[in-house]
Amino acid sequence: MERSRNRYQLLTRWDDKKIDAYADYVDAVKAKIAMAVRLYEFREGMRQEERTERELRDDLADASLTWGRSFERVMLLGGDDAIEAAHELNVVLAEINLTGFKGCTGLLALDLSPCGTTVARG
């Protein structure tokens, strides 16, 4: 009985860690997208900022670091379906990130052809 209860507690803690990893990853993706959009809109004159372009680029770089760490946790703790979904989301996120960093057009349509860069979707 005691062994069964301990096993259940361990599984519950493991599930909690997975849920935390998934939630952190989604939050990091949202932050990275928000930073890329902010930088893109600033460059296109669609947004007024008190911060410089360099500061906005640094914010996007910081968001990228946080995203990278959260993705690694998903890779370590996540199930196969969650890992596959994260990989697919990362493809789209890479396109958005390139738009923010390189100043390419087509952020909303995710069309990077003006940059001469394409990200394979699978």
Image: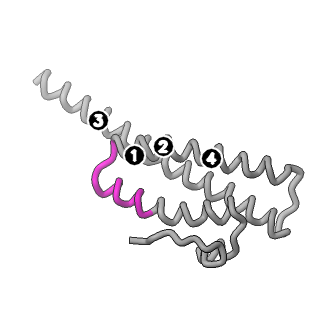
Gap between marks 3 and 2, in whole Å?
21 Å
- Numbered disc in front, either 3 or 1: 1
| Disc marking residue 74 | 1
Q: Amino acid at mark 4?
A: Ala
In this orientation, which residue lies closer to the viewer: 38 or 2?
Answer: 38
Residue drawn at x 60%, y 64% is 96
Reading the image, the residue beneath label 3 is: 12
How many badges with numbers are in the image? Answer: 4
Gap between marks 3 and 4, in whole Å?
30 Å
Q: Secondary structure at mark 4?
A: helix
| Disc marking residue 111 | none
Gap between marks 4 and 2, in whole Å?
11 Å
| Quadrant occupied by the N terminus | top left
Q: Which residues are magenta?
A: 77-88
Q: Give residue 108's position: percent from left, percent from top.
A: 64, 74
Reading the image, the residue beneath label 4 is: 63
> Farthest residue toward the front?
116
Reading the image, the residue beneath label 2 is: 70
In this orientation, which residue lies closer to the viewer: 73 or 2?
Answer: 73
User: Magenta region's main secondary structure?
Assistant: helix
- Numbered disc in front, either 3 or 2: 2
Q: Is residue 97 above or below residue 5?
A: below
> CB under 8 Å between callouts 2 and 1?
yes
> Farthest residue toward the left?
1
Q: Amino acid at mark 2?
A: Ser
Q: Amino acid at mark 3?
A: Thr
Q: Amino acid at mark 1?
A: Val
Q: Quadrant of residue 15?
A: top left
